[in-house]
Amino acid sequence: GKVFNYYMIEDLTPGVEYFVRIAALNEAGTGLSSHSTPFSLAPGSKPTDLEDQNGVTVATILADSTVSVMESSSTLRVSWRAPFSDNGFDITSYLIEYWISNGVNEVQEITLQSHSGSPVQGTFTLSYGEATTDSLSIDSSAEDVKSALESLSTIRSVRVWRSGANPDYKWTVTFVSEYPSVLGLVLIVDDTTEIADATGGVATLQINVLTPGMLPIRYSTQVVESVPLQTQYHYILTDLTAGQPYRVQVSAGNSLGYGRPQSSIPLELAPPIQKPSSPTNVILSVASSHSLEIIFSKPESDGGETVTRYQIEWDTDPAFSSLDGSPLGSYSYVSPVNGPGCEPCAHQITGLVKGEDYFVRVYAYNSRGYSVDPGLTAPEFLSPKTTPDPPAVMSISPQSDTEIQVSFPPSGDDGGAPVTMYKVEWNAMGFFAGMSSMNSDHTALLYSPYNVQAITLTAEEDDLGGSFRLSFEGHSTEEISAKSTANEMKLALESLPTVGSTVVSRESLANGFTWAVTFLTNFGYISTYGPLESLKVSTDPAALPDVFVTDTFGVSGSSLLGTNARLIVSDEVAAFKGYEQQTLTTQCDTSGGILDGYFEVSFEGVRTTPIPFNAAASDLKLELETIAPLGTVKVIRRSVNDSINSFQWTVIFIDRLGNIPLLGVHDHLSCSDGSGSPLIFVTETAQGVLPRMDGPYSGEVSLNALDYADDNDIVHTVGGLIRGMPYHFRVSAWNGAGESYGKTQYASPSILVPMDRPDPPSSVEMSSIDDATIQIAWDTSLAKGGSHQISKFAVELLEDSVGNDAQSEDAIESFDIENAPEVQIIVLESSADDMGGMFVAHFMGESSSNIYTDSNAAQIEQALEGISTIDSVNVTIFSHTQDSMASYGQRWVITFTSQKGNLPSILVDTGSAPPSTIATGGTLFGSSSVIRVETISDGGLPSSFITPSQLSRNQKYSSRILAFNGYSWSDPATSRYAITPSKMAPSPPRGVRVNVLSDTEIGVSWTQPLYSGGDNVAAYRVEWDSDVMFDHSSTTVSHVSGSEDYYFVIKNLDPLESYYVRVMAYSAQGHSIPEMALPLLCTMQTLVVELVETTGSVDFSETFRVQVTTVDGYQRETNPISVYATSREVENELNKLGIVGAISVDREDRSNVYDSSGIETNFFDIRYSITLVGDEDITLSVTGDSLGSITAIIQED
């Protein structure tokens, strides 16, 4: 085989590059040189090993002011010195290795094999990774192989053991520092290997992995760059586990690779387990006026042991030594051990002194003790405080028609810190034409005393025209122009008996109008007290109220013109919305029980005096208002289940807003029959709410509390408000607690309209009543200063001391003119003294119990006051049956004693037709019996005044009138002239009525004048004529001293004529103004339907239908009616049509079987006399498809 020659060049300088060539010598001389491969090479090796004594050390790092517990408990410091020699190549870096448990050293075996069994000669090279050894003799020792492998840049340290003899060598290589299998590496016999046995046979080297290597547990490395001339190095191992021992070794490296690693001294070391670090994210906040809340998170480091509790300490001294060197208070907070724990943790420190500054700190604890330093709070200290109480009261008053002044005292409780700001907020609580609807929001437009509805008329083009009609509670208006003014709309609505006083405004739209209708005196009870049913509209001139709608979209009609014209009615403001409403009910638990006794009501520990079981609404109101916390309330009473002794009182809390606890009741009631028990309970009918304070009409202003003296009220005027719009105000205070304003205090009253002084009245006129009495009349103010209405007038009577110069007048007396009560009259009349039965009264959608025609005044009052929409009334009964007047019945004069303004009419209902101002039939009996309702005098504020009869006939008087709108008085309006009281003609007779006594006689009745004019009334002049010229006939009736009521019978009249009648009173001063007579009984139209059959072909199954047609052309037809129907059955069918106010029917059977006289009789002959009560004319027709041989004849009676 080949012969290999070696020569070791020694004593070279490490790191210096050398060139080598070789030439062969023989006896002939030196041959050519051959250059080495590589061409040049610098001698050297990996760095020498680090010192084995103190060359590498590992140490813990103690926590201090610069080292945190987390750092201390999770780090080790590794230190080492640079090796003695870099062996010719500069050290570039150091490799630090560390782990917690040793791995498995990999063992690989190199086996030599010869097929012939002869010794092997030659050389071999080994590769590992990308590095390859020099050529090794096949007889290399274990040390030779070890040195060759450790010279590789990829291997730092191995152990080699050789066994066997050539050709059976085995080199066992244990990797001390590398883990080939982990990296997927293995020693490889390089291609440059050249070996053969002595015979020239084939020899091989084979490498096997005996033991795969495994990395140490949690094995990690770090590389530290070398620094020139630096000999001492330090490195911090981080993210270690406290208490866990780590092993560390360091290797130095140069361009030839890392040298053998040096283990640390000590061989292993653990980061220390220690006390935890301070809790983190410690936040201090105010919990209440006597407590603070501390919130904190776990420490950055638990020191290697679980934190089990925290120590919270507080003190007013920042040194926490107020209590003999200890803090004022402490609390041991145990940290939850299961689940996520408290992250963050929180604790409230209670029992602190409000307004006192407190310092708070918290320590963390583990088995090694409490953290060295506490967690300090941010902010450093706080005083227990809460948001301040709002001012106890807030008063508001108008300053002008766009300004409202607010005033309130300072906050009674500053919450522990000075109040520095007050916030005043306001929002609109009303509606005007053109405003976006907000009624669907239960927190918007609250506390209104009125209902507001909007009527919106639109078209797609500017071509609106024609008319429409409105209805309310079953009654409809005449046609209303599509371009009606606000006043025209007001007059149309107030013409309905179901509508009282209104205020109407109009806003023009692009192609239409919106009318906003404010109902001043209409209220309802739709689940809660206040809201009304909606107005309804129709564009059909002949439609009846029951087919009117709230939206005409898709509804046919001919009276309204315009491209796709449309009418919509919307409810915009509900009366009393937002107020708490509670209902107190008393009753017996059996139908036969009669309630008696009293009860008491309590609230917040205050109790009323005993309240009778049947207390009036006004009496309960007075009792409740003695409980100061309740303030002003409104009380409505209604009867329960038509019972005369079981009641419900609905209490509306006007001053106290929001959700209010239920009233307490204390039962002292009894049920007289002994079989039942009394029941008394309170329910919440409507929960009180506070309004939203945002939106397009809201506002707020912040007031600096420091701008006001400590004990003085804060006063501020809010301007820029909408004229006529009611506003709600509230106030809150700020002291910095919670970075927010505190609770709010609402203003009293709950809403207020900005108002200015009203205009003075106008056209003040004076006239004499007699020589001691003057009447003063005026026109009301046009501009009411932003209010809906004038609430009262003041009349000042002045004596004229210098001629007619009003400037020299001195007031001698002043009179306040308040609202006059509404007076209505229920008239019960019949043509014979046989009236009986009962009816039900309706008022603003609510109904009474049954009222009998023979009821006394107390019973009528009780029934009417059982209606929730009637507060209280006074009833007086007058009979109008007189010998000379062929009419029977009574007049019930109903005076509304507490409700103000022009009220809707009472409606009457006998069950035969919808409720109306006139009724007949149904539950009412008697000859031509009718019940009707008239308004004697509208409620409201009078615009005239009659002085007491005590003036001097020798003195001239003038007068001044002032108007008051609830806020301020107007300037006075003065009468143009001063007058002297003088005798005058008497005032007109009162209550002039006429009634037909026969076809040639009319009875006239009247009552004496209210004022005689200063002289005694001498007589009365009665005039009658077929026209209003009154130049036909008259007579004189003497006045009888002491007699108030008079009557006269006009005889010998033409049966074919209609007559007008009037009456005048006269004295020595002349005739009074004539008073026109009104019919005593209702106007009636009578039509007769006669069913006749003469041949005897009646089988008793025949029916007919009656069609009723109004003068407007509207038609309705009854259901089929039997030819043998009673008068009541026909009457009910006709009244169900709802076309007219009331219809009564009489039936007469002239059939031969009942009338054998033969005079105006037939085999079958039944006459129905149909009487329409009222002013409306109708025509009748009969549909006889099912009459068979019966003939229907219609004629006017």
Image (cartoon, rainbow, N blue to C red):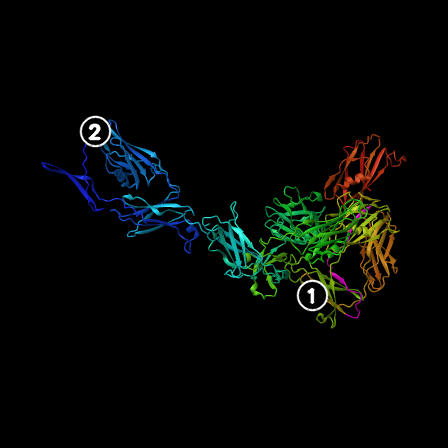
The picture places residue 1164, in percent across and down from the top left corner, at 84, 33
Is there any visible trace of residue 498 in the rendered image? no
The picture places residue 663, in percent across and down from the top left corner, at 70, 52
Q: Is residue 69 above or below residue 6?
A: below
Question: Magenta residues, as a range?
Answer: 929-955
- Image quadrant holding the C terminus, namely top right
Image disc number at residue 72: none
- Image quadrant holding the N terminus, namely top left
Q: Quadrant of residue 1196?
A: top right
Which of marks 2 and 1 precedes in the sequence? 2
Residue marked by disc 2: 198
Q: Is residue 373 left or right of residue 465?
A: left
Is there any visible trace of residue 101 in the rendered image? yes
Q: Residue at x 30, y 44 (%)?
A: 260
Q: Residues within 10 Å of mark 2 (few under 14, many from 20)?
A: some
Q: Residue at x 82, y 31 (%)?
A: 1098
Q: Amino acid at mark 2?
A: Ala
Per the image, is 399 magenta?
A: no
Per the image, is 931 magenta?
A: yes
Q: Residues within 10 Å of mark 1 (few under 14, many from 20)?
A: some
SS category of the residue bearing label 1: loop
Residue marked by disc 1: 972
Q: Amino acid at mark 1?
A: Pro
What's the CA distance linking mark 1 and mark 2?
150 Å
The picture places residue 1084, in percent across and down from the top left corner, at 80, 46
SS category of the residue bearing label 2: loop
